[in-house]
Image: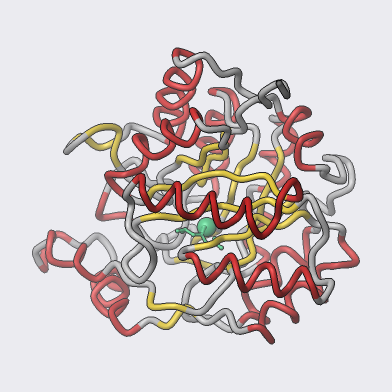
Amino acid sequence: MAKKQKTIITCAVTGAIHTPTMSDALPYTYDDIAKQAIEAAEAGASILHLHARDNVTGAPSVNPDDFAAFLPRVKQATDSVINISTGGSLTLSIQDRIKPAKTFSPEMCSMNMGSMNFSFHPLANRYKDDDWKFDWEKEYVANSDQNIFRNTFRDIKEAADTLAPHDIKFEHECYDVGHLYNLKFCMEVGLFKAPIFIQFIFGILGGIGPEVDNLVFMKRTADRLFGDDYRWSVLGAGGAQMSLASTASQIGGNVRVGLEDSLFISRGKLAESNAHQVSKIRGIVEDLGCEVATPDEAREILDLKGGDCVSF
Ligand code: KMH
Ligand code: ZN
């Protein structure tokens, strides 16, 4: 029997869904993003999926200057694989969203595999008008019911072609089964080379729900479409985060946690930090008999270019 590969933990540190009002633990200043990313790596995350935010207001940002303020610090303090988001802020153009990855040429970046509704507007109802810490937050959250997260085939091709010279491995974000077929098509026309890395995403309003049946369905479909040419990981949004990650780790998958995807550590209890979630999933994965991959092991499993081939 083939030896089971070690489990790669990705930590998505801040993202663009949650806002500062929702949890004091959500990092948004340069210092806090750097600090929490470093602590997450120390706790066992071998990949850090990073977005930037405005240092003062915490609004999601795709300005390369906002990334430049923390990327070198994270690189110097850890050996982790840096993965820069190209999802950025959900309503921006693909040209703006790929600027940070183009500028910094990281080992990995995200690549969203289809257009979709992408909403978190129900979160706005949890807060009273006086609760919001910053002016932009309420409208940003409440208006997400009109978001179309645009990732057309032309957008995907533009991102792939622009980033190809940088030899970046993509975290293919697949929010529903159709996105796997989009990815298959893109491979057939030569946009991406094996082994690809798929992030199965469950529980985003607009995507597939967080049931185990859906995880099995996504995995079976990917097995059929990609055979041995893919590695995979699971991201359960919100309350599904830990349970789906644990299940994935038991059937050969890698896992993604972090405050981008859920603010909680257990039902109704906010996580203290990104490292808090990483430590928890690491404990579960190890207790259940799997080993966690180091950054260099993750590089080998995913066939990455190496931490010294980045531009920051
Ligand atoms: N926030 C996640 C559900 C990206 O950065 O490109 C998806 C994500 C997208 O991480
Ligand atoms: Zn992201």
Q: Quadrant of residue 308?
A: top right
Is 177 placed left or right of 21 in the picture?
Answer: right
Q: How many marks?
A: 0
Q: On the picture, is 227 further left or further right than 152?
A: right
Above/below status of 8 relative to 183: above
In percent of width and height, residue 28 lies at 45, 52
- Looking at the picture, does residue 174 appear above or below residue 238? below
Q: Nearer the viewer, residue 1 or 5?
A: 1
> Residue 285 at what x, y percent from top left?
48, 22
> Visible in this render: residue 17?
yes
Decide: is 103 above or below 226.
below
Identified at 75% across, 81% down, the residue is 158
How far across and down, in percent of the image, does residue 32 sit?
Answer: 48, 42
Residue 245 percent across, percent down from the top left: 43, 37
The residue drawn where x is 54% and y is 28% is 39
Query: What scheme was used to colour the molecule?
Result: secondary structure
Q: Residue at x 60, y 22 (%)?
A: 292
Question: Which corner quadrant of the image does residue 259 belong to?
Answer: top left
Q: Is residue 229 above or below residue 42?
A: below
Which quadrant: the N terminus? top right
| Res. 19 in view | no
Dividing the picture into quarters, in which one does residue 226 lie? Answer: bottom right
Which residue is pictured at 33% across the width and 51% down the height? 210
| Relative depth, front residue between 164 and 141 | 164
